[in-house]
Structures are given as C-alpha cells and as structure tokens.
Image: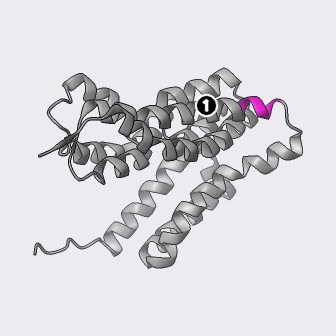
Amino acid sequence: MKEINSFSKGIRNGLPICFGYLSVAFAFGIFAGGSGLSVAEALLISATNVTSAGQLAAVPIIAGGGTLLELAVSQLVINLRYALMSVSLSQRLGGSVRLRDRFLIAFVNTDEVFAVAMAQNASVGRRYLYGLILTPYIGWSLGTLLGAVAGNLLPAVVISALGLAIYAMFIAIVLPKMKKHRPTAICVAIAVALSCAFYYIPLLQRVPSGFSVILCAVIAAAVMALLRPIKEEADE
C-alpha cells in the first residue's frame, strides 16, 4: 500500500485541529486557574496529558486534594477509548513507523488526529504523523497558557463567563448524539441523576468527588449496556 510520509502535509492537515484546540484549551486554562491552579501547573497538565475530558475531570480532584488513586482511576475510565483508537490506527501505520515512534504518536492521538489519519487513502508514515500531531500539540499547550494567564488579568465577571465555555463544549459534543440516539440520551440522564444524588444526598456526599465521577460514568454505561446493548452489524 502507498505510504503518505510528508511532514509538510501533516502540518497542513494538523493546522485546523490546532486552531480548534486553541479556543478549547483557552477555556481549560481559565477553568484551571479559577480552580486555584497556577499558570505553570495548568500548562504542565496540558503539556503532559492532551486530553480535554480527562483534564477537566482531573482539575477538581487536584484542587480538592483528592488521592492519586482517584486521579488514576478517573483518567483510566475517561481515556480508555484512546487505547482502542491507537489499536485501530496501528493497522494503518506505514513501514517507516518504528516502535519508539508509536509511543510518541500515541501520546497525541486525540479524537481529531485519529480521524484525520484514518481518513487518508493510504498508510501513514512517521514524518506525516509527526507533522500531524505537532501543530495540535502546540495549539493545545499555547491555548492553555493563554487562558491561564488571562485568568490572572481579566475581571472576575469575564472569567466566570469564559469558564462556562468548556462545559458548553461538552454539551455541544453530546447533544447532537442525544437528539439522534435515544439510548445515549437515557444514559446521559442516568449519569446526571446519579451526579445529583452524589451532590445532594448526605450519605453519598461522603464519597470523594473523583470517585463519584467514575461511579456515575461506569454505572450509567453499565445500565445501558444491559438494557440497550449495541448490536453488531452482520458481515456482508
């Protein structure tokens, strides 16, 4: 199979992702700063994780003094999909991709990077993939830095408004799927109800925030997996 291995093509394909990440990471930077993290801490989180959902879940755990176990389990549950995406992408890697390249590429194998790489009509080489992940990584880190710095300079009322942007992002991701797929809407409703229970019921309030997030996600997914399992399509 033909191999795409142009670094410049990877850069070009990664630029739209970079610009998209700038705004999302900016919102995360403000959120992290508003939760009590310093600019350096917010930047370090983004530079070493590159996962919007995982980072959003991690900040309250860190700011609330949660345990390392809470942090590790929450990241495992939230980011498990990346392992599946990496396995799928590995089937499209060209012969130029070495073992050490796989580790570096997997580090920035986000949903958008995965989609662009898999959309190519040929196998993808190491130079192309390094170009593809470079600009999104810069955009994610730079956006976080700008957001965290802005959080120290802008008025409190502006910070509060911008802090809602990251929640709006997740609503925008989930809402279209909920409107088209009833089981997804039910799953989200179950997770929301459980989250409210952990917040308002005195006995459940004793559960650390990190574990409550994990339990809401796992229980809601397990209930819907039992009630409305996704049927595998028959091979043609």
Q: Which range of residues does the magenta coloring cover?
A: 148-152
Q: Quadrant of the C terminus?
A: bottom left
Which residue is located at x 66 percent, y 29 percent? 145
Percent coordinates x, y for residue 108 in the rendering: 40, 35
Q: Quadrant of residue 82?
A: top left
Using the image, determine if residue 42 lies above or below residue 119: above
Is residue 62 rendered to the left or right of residue 190? right
Q: Quadrant of residue 227?
A: bottom left
Which residue is located at x 71 percent, y 35 percent? 147
Q: Mark 1 is on which residue type?
A: Leu
In the depicted view, which residue is nearer to us: 5 or 163? 5
Q: How many marks?
A: 1
Is residue 160 rendered to the left or right of residue 106? right
Instruction: Check the image and tell me how it is coloured.
Output: one colour
Q: Is residue 150 magenta?
A: yes
Residue under numbered circle 1 = 142
Percent coordinates x, y for residue 51 in the rendering: 49, 40
